[in-house]
Image: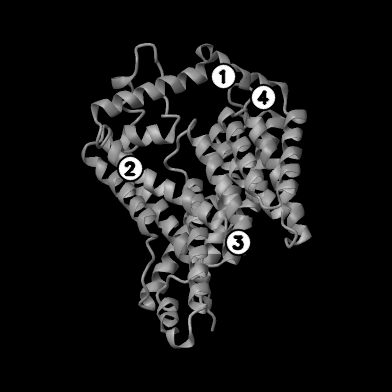
Amino acid sequence: MGPGAQEQRRDVLSFYMLAGFAAVMYAVPGEWIPALEPLRLALLTSGLGAGLMVMRRIGKAEPIFFDGSRGIALLAFSSLAFCSVAWSVNPEVTRFQGVELLKLTAIYLTLVNVITSPKRLAVVCGAMVLGAIVTSIGVINWYIVGENMVEGFRSRWVGVYADPNHMAMNMVLVVPLAVAFLARKSTPWVFRLLCAVSAVLAVVAIVLSHSRGGFIGLSVAMALWAIREKRRMQAIVLGTVFVAGLAVFAPKSFWQRNETVAAFHEDASAMGRVYAWQVASRMSLDKPLLGVGAGGFRYAWFQYAPPEAHRAYVAHNIFLDVIGELGWIGLLCFLVFSGGAVGGAVAASADSEMGWLARALSASVAGYLICDLFSGYILSAHCYVLFGLAASAHRIAQARERALAVGRQPAVNTAPVATWEGSGHAA
């Protein structure tokens, strides 16, 4: 049995549940198929995935992998959010947010325990790419029929995609993954075709959202992927095609809204961000260590907002949101977690077998975080799934390095192989 073969056979059912969750996270069938709503498929698949993983590990007396400093920082972050009920400006909202963050932490830890091979990593990423087709079609259809437009022209969809900015940033992370599958020659042609469709539709959905942050995040993600991809010329050509398509087919209203950045004082949406950032700054000055409590940003708004800010907004920046709600302690935990995920994806990019997908993941993480500088959603399953996939890529790459190093040792020193295989940390 080769190194890692035993680990790859573990948690099979949990892996299937995670792949299903990745698809459901985008397709959200319970939001538009009434008969499926009571099933709560996202909670069902993620809960079963986490539960099966834990049951398997307990039953086999195997340790659960907590992902080093990244995982510990996330556990500390979600625990701090839950404990902030004690000092929150709105304990009920904080309690809800704390519970949700603990659920998202469980999803993250399930991912890093179950995604233990390049194949599994590719399957979950592929499930997200395919699921995003449904989301994009929903957004485009609403735009065509003119249903529930924000500000009269910004398209969106159901559930977590009801906010155009949130929808756009969730679609941004899919595009580099879809393009990476498309550019890889070994990808089956049917799946390559579906990836091309997914990427094009996702870009269209981002355009129809008229999200300025989404546009910037997409541009950064695709530029980063093209620059770091080893087959650089092909990557640049693909990136150029997407940019050209955006320039040609984007509606006039898309460019008009992006031009308002230069005159942000006259743009209510842009000024809402300015006010939100001022509020976050004042929260930090007043309660620097622990903030106003998880989820309390909008409820503490009028205590810290300038007189001209008559409406309460979200923080519109995930880092300022964290520092306002959970203080510098919370921000430190979040930076260790998110920075570790970014660094992990970048480190895994050098892997000979899986580097092509790790480079796409690092581009997705960068684009997503750029979007989060203008949005700010702590409770986003997409964020923790994306970071979990990046961390899994890093773990797989590290395990492959260790396996190769062990394989080069003389036969008399093969004992560490058995210990490593049985530790639950193999790829």
Q: Check disc 2 and report the residue beneath it.
A: 332
What's the amino acid at mark 3? Answer: Met
In the rendered structure, which disc, 4 or 3, sits on the residue that comes first in sequence?
4
* Rendered-image quadrant of the N terminus: bottom right
Q: Is residue 9 above or below residue 148?
A: below
- Residue 163 x/y as whole percent: 54, 33
The answer to whether the residues at label 1 and label 2 have Cβ atoms under 8 Å apart is no
Distance from Cα at disc 1 to Cα at disc 2:
31 Å
* Disc 4 from disc 2: Cα separation: 36 Å
Amino acid at pointer 2? Leu
Q: Which residue is mark 4?
A: 254
Q: Position of residue 67 (x, y in %)?
A: 40, 60
Is 17 rendered above or below residue 365? Answer: below
Image height check: is 298 above or below 66?
above
Question: Which residue is label 3 attached to?
Answer: 354
- Give the SS element for disc 3: loop
Going from N to C along the chain, the mark reached first, 1 or 4, is 4
User: Which label's residue is closer to the chain start, 1 or 2?
Assistant: 1
Name the element at disc 1.
helix
Q: Which residue lies under the disc numbered 1?
A: 261
Q: Quadrant of residue 86?
A: top left
| Cβ atoms under marks 1 and 3 closer than 8 Å | no
Q: Amino acid at mark 1?
A: Val
Nearer to us of marks 4 and 2 is 2
* Camera-nearest label, 1 or 3: 3
Q: What type is the residue that disc 4 sits on?
A: Phe
* Residue shown at 49% from the left, 30% from the top: 374
In this view, the residue in front, 290 or 139, is: 290
Of callouts 4 and 2, the N-terminal one: 4
User: Is label 2 in a helix, a strand or a loop?
Assistant: helix
